[in-house]
């Protein structure tokens, strides 16, 4: 417990020294401003063109909520690549701490921030009403994507240049849960290979333009299991590379 507290404290202190991390603290509010104020303006501007943006609010809601943990996962993934290049992870092998403990503690802080900021985004952009307990659980499961994103970037890249390329190359993942809303069910389950699909479908269960085939809690349960399994597979592959 003491080791976990020390690692979380270290991550917290780093925020004040890293301009990129400071930006991450501000970014959810910028995203909220876009959703709260810019979307209604665009809605009014496009009505005269026989296009009703309100018909796609469910897709925008999913995009805003899922974009949150994706960005955090990309950033913490780059931070972990930095530590790999500096041989920090190799040095940890001789310390009295498990590598899994270190990585989980490192991502825990961002998971907490992602969950809280995701709830704020869900509430403040006010496109759809989502009960607070449901919002918490949906954003918590979605924020497991922080760990998945961090591991995916490190599986695909061994240095920061490759890391940025991996982020660019996997950017389409953000759109898959949105596209799934427009694919007839049950064919949209093919999009379930993307971890973000499951919390997205749980969120979509609260939209009047989407009729789910399962209960929201079933989507969340599957999401937790699936994201955990995929993240564990990625973690083991990364550890094989680091320890080799």
Image: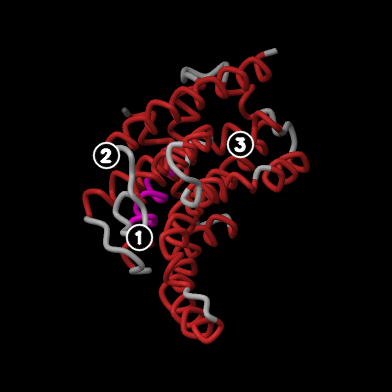
Identify the residue position indicated by label 1 in the image.
122
Identify the residue position indicated by label 2 in the image.
215
* CB within 8 Å, label 2 to label 3: no
Labels 2 and 3: the sequence-earlier one? 3
Labels 1 and 2: the sequence-earlier one? 1
Cα–Cα gap, marks 2 and 3: 36 Å
- Going 38% across and 28% down the picture, which residue do you hit? 3
Labels 3 and 1: the sequence-earlier one? 3
Marking on residue 60? none
* CB within 8 Å, label 3 to label 1: no
Identify the residue position indicated by label 3 in the image.
80
- Which residue, as the protein is rendered here, is positioned at the far top? 244
What is the span of residues highlighted in magenta in the rendered image? Answer: 111-119
**Secondary structure found at label 3:** helix
Q: Quadrant of the C terminus?
A: top right
Residue 188 or 99: which is nearer the viewer?
188
Q: Quadrant of the N terminus?
A: top left
Where in the figure is residue 69, as x and y percent of width and height? 48, 48
């Amino acid at each position: 417990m003491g080791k976990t507290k020390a690692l979380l404290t270290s991550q917290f202190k780093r925020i004040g020294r890293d301009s990129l991390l400071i930006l991450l603290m501000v970014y959810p509010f910028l995203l909220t401003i876009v959703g709260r104020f810019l979307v209604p303006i665009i809605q009014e501007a496009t009505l005269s063109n026989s296009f009703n943006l309100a018909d796609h609010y469910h897709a925008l809601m999913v995009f805003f909520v899922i974009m949150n943990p994706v960005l955090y996962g990309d950033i913490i993934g780059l931070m972990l690549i930095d530590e790999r290049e500096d041989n920090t992870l190799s040095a940890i092998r001789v310390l009295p701490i498990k590598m899994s403990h270190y990585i989980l503690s490192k991502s825990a802080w961002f998971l907490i921030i992602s969950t809280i900021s995701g709830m704020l985004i869900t509430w403040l952009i006010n496109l759809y009403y989502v009960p607070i307990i449901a919002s918490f659980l949906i954003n918590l499961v979605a924020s497991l994507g922080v760990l998945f994103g961090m591991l995916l970037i490190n599986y695909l890249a061994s240095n920061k240049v490759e890391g940025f390329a991996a982020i660019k190359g996997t950017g389409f993942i953000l759109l898959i849960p949105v596209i799934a809303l427009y694919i007839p069910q049950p064919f949209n389950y093919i999009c379930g290979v993307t971890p973000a699909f499951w919390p997205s479908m749980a969120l979509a269960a609260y939209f009047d333009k989407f009729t789910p085939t399962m209960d929201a809690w079933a989507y969340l349960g599957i999401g937790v299991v699936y994201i955990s399994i995929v993240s564990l597979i990625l973690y083991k592959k990364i550890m094989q590379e680091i320890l080799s």
